[in-house]
Image (tube, rainbow, N blue to C red):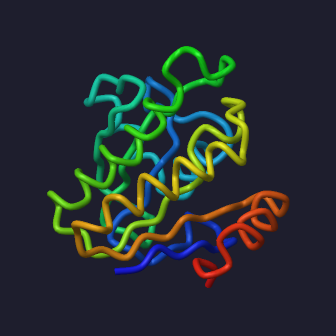
Amino acid sequence: MPLLIQRNDITQMKVDAIVNAANSSLLGGGGVDGCIHRAAGRKLVEECMTIGGCPTGEARVTKGYELPCRYVIHTVGPIWNGGAFGEPSLLASCYAESLKLADSLECRTIAFPLISAGAYGYPKDKALEIAINSIDGFLNKHEMTVFLLLFDQQIFDMARKLYPQLLK
């Protein structure tokens, strides 16, 4: 099944699950996290309060509530500190754990943002490479359609040059 790169609003995706680039509290924040929480409505944060947070590199699931998806998979990406503190493996783990969770929920479609590439400062080119390699590795063994949504025009243009076959 395919990996497709799009420039789109994750809160509008009609997929089985969307992935939230969350903070460790899971209680909402800025960027994509804040957008997802606002679009999902108050019940999302209420359910997140019962989970008790999420460590970096792991994933948790909630219902989608007012979003057009069944599930929100919350994952906490690493904050970029130069790359010598395990950031690459933690970021790859975010994708792997989210995809494993989606597979266990029998999701056929999932949409990801570019995790850690916003407020957490991960270099966008490095984050893009890890995302694509992690997702591609999963898709070699599993059937699922995965959307990688790039909000930023600069990173979308970079993806268009590096991975033209993946753009939809």
Total labels: the figure holds: 0
- Where residue 53 sits in the image (x, y, percent)? 35, 24
Q: Would residue 111 be found to the left or right of residue 8 on screen?
A: left
Q: Would residue 153 be found to the left or right of residue 91 on screen?
A: right
Q: Is residue 43 visible to us here?
A: no
- Identified at 28% across, 46% down, the residue is 61
Q: Would residue 19 be found to the left or right of residue 54 on screen?
A: right
In front: 45, or 77?
77
Relative to 126, is 165 above or below? below
Relative to 105, is 85 above or below? above
Quarter where residue 57 is shown: top left
Relative to 24, is 17 above or below? below
Residue at the far right in the pictured view = 154
Where's the C terminus, which quadrant?
bottom right
- Identified at 47% across, 55% down, the residue is 133
Q: Is residue 114 visible to us here?
A: yes
- Identified at 41% across, 79% down, the residue is 2
In front: 79, or 15?
79
- Where residue 100 sits in the image (x, y, percent)? 23, 52
Q: Would residue 128 be found to the left or right of residue 41 on screen?
A: right
- Where residue 35 sits in the image (x, y, percent)? 62, 51
- Identified at 72% across, 60% down, the residue is 151
Quarter where residue 39 is shown: bottom right
Where's the N terminus, which quadrant?
bottom left
